[in-house]
Amino acid sequence: MRLLIGNELYHEVVLDKLLHARESVWIATANVKAMLVNADADSEKFVPIIDVFARLADKGVELRLLHADLPSRPFRQAFDKKKNLVRGGLELKVCPRVHFKCVLIDGGFVYLGSANLTGAGLGAKSEQRRNVCPDPIGQAVAKVRASAQRNQKRRRSIVGKWKQR
């Protein structure tokens, strides 16, 4: 396990893994927008993520996208122009309660964090324009520990009162 911060997230998840997927790309996100990514890891040319999905679908990569809300209008318009995606190359599923963010690539690489499928999340935005929590795992662990400590104190208090009876 490794903590990815800022542009490390984009480089690892998008450039190193997603662009080179061979079997499957499963993504769960709250928001879906028409984001730009490098055409390939060595290119300075940017393309819409939907073009990357279309290229992967042409190679037979299974693409699934679980999302909470309707994708942005530009994403939907770009999707509608990619016949291979419309015909099932990108499986879209709306689940209004989805808030977790996950990218699973080729059944072996997993990203879990706070970045949505947007330019400011997983897209090619600059370091200053990222819209993600810098340490989501550390913050989650701290919240779980704090909650466990509070619950332990409550149990001691309740047990102490019960024994006094």
Image (cartoon, helix red, strand yellow):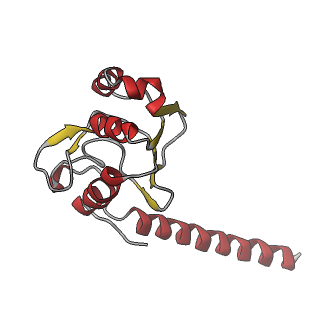
Q: Quadrant of residue 84?
A: top left
- The answer to which of 7 and 148 lies nearer the viewer is 7
Q: Relative to 102, is 137 above or below?
A: below
Q: Nearer the viewer, residue 131 or 16?
A: 16
User: In which quadrant will I find the C terminus?
Assistant: bottom right
The image shows residue 117 at horizontal and vertical percentages of: 35, 42
Residue 40 place in picture, x, y as percent: 21, 50
In the displayed orientation, state which residue is furthest to the right.
165
Q: Is residue 15 left or right of residue 56?
A: left
Observer able to see residue 132: no
Residue 37 in which image quadrant = top left
Give coordinates of residue 73: x percent, y percent.
31, 22
Query: In the current view of this chain or complex, which residue is farthest to the left?
Result: 44
Residue for point 43% across, 40% down? 30
Query: What residue is shown at x 43% (from left), y 65% (from top)?
Result: 137
Say how many tags the image has.
0
126 left or right, relative to 83: left
Rendered position, 14 above or below 151 = above
Q: Residue at x 58, y 67 (%)?
A: 147
In the image shown, does 144 or 129 lie closer to the viewer?
Answer: 129
Residue 43 to residue 68: above or below: below
Q: Is residue 81 visible?
A: yes
Residue 107 location (% of width, % of height)? 51, 57
Left or right placement of residue 61 versus residue 120 in this view = right
